[in-house]
Image (spheres, grey):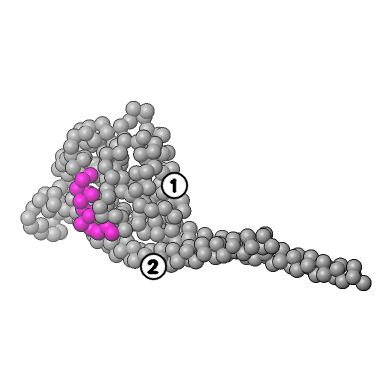
Amino acid sequence: MGGIRELRGRIKSVGNIRQITRAMEMVASTKLRRFQDRALSSRPYSQEVTALVTHLASVLGEEVAKRPLFQPGKGKAIAVLVVCSNRGLCGAYNTNLFRVLEQWQRELPADADVRLFVYGKKGYQYLNARKRKIERLFVEPELEKIDYRAAARAAKTMIDVFLSGEYREVRLLATAFESMVRYVPRWIDLLPIRAEALGAGETAHATTPGDVLLEPDAATIFDRLVPRYLETRVYNALIEAITSEYASRRVSMKNATDAAKDMQSQLKLVYNRKRQETITKELLDIVGGVEALR
């Protein structure tokens, strides 16, 4: 009976795990819908800001290239803002991100000076264990509690880093949310701002300088708007990252729940087979004893 008792305990343990993963799946689904709504609602604002910056850049023409944020930095280092998760149990979400980062670093020259700015404890643990140069870990607020104001502070930090004279460019690596089952790591060239990022060459928002009356002048509006443009890019990247994290966690917990269900079914089959064998053996012993008495 020892084997049967052991199987009964395993069935109960797997059932408890299944209940936990099911609950985590439901929590992840609820949070996923909330963050997905925020990610989708922020896109129109980001598109309008980008369109306005693109129009002002076309108005100013060659003057844009003279501004510090549009020129390569004076230093040689490369700053990378890596956005990971604070907790695990989200499948290959962090692993895919680290794979892209490692591949990019292998393609750089051996003497490249890469300095990392990390959002998420999992990223810090991974990079610190590999002795990577981590300049800063963003702790507050947690990515799950991120808002536009916190994203603006992170963007300002990266702008100050770029203007410090030690860096030549600033890049951002985060997971882009494309659908409920598709979320891929994506590089964003944050600084210096390039014409491609502004959509130069697109005619959808192209207008002539005389179409609108700008008050104050276009240069003043442009200089005030560029930081907002960078803030929206960072905010969208952070929101899509946390959305992708919960999408990955929901899928992982669903797979774990299904696996626990299958395991529980298999254990029950083994349990019933052993129990039937034990009953059959006891019946044979009884019948053998009766025949012996005769």
Q: CA distance from mark 1 to mark 2?
A: 24 Å
Q: Residue furthest top?
A: 111
Q: Amino acid at mark 1?
A: Thr
What residue is shown with label 1? 95
x, y percent for residue 24: 44, 63
For the residue labelled by badge 1, is the local secondary structure a helix, a strand or a loop? Answer: helix
* Vertical order, 103 against 218 (above or below): above
Q: Amino acid at mark 2?
A: Thr
Q: Nearer the viewer, residue 22 or 8?
A: 8
Q: Which mark is residue 30?
A: 2
Q: Nearer the viewer, residue 52 or 45?
A: 45
User: Can I make out residue 58 in this image?
Assistant: no
- Is 154 included in the stretch rendered in magenta? yes
Quadrant in which the N terminus is drawn: bottom right
Q: Earlier in the sequence, mark 1 or mark 2?
A: 2
Quadrant in which the C terminus is drawn: bottom right
Is residue 165 left or right of 233 when viewed as pictured?
A: left
x, y percent for residue 172: 31, 46
x, y percent for residue 225: 16, 53
**Which residue is at a point 42% across and 38% down the rendered structure image?**
103
Residue bounds of the magenta highlight? 145-158
**Which residue is at a point 34% across and 63% down the rendered structure image?**
35
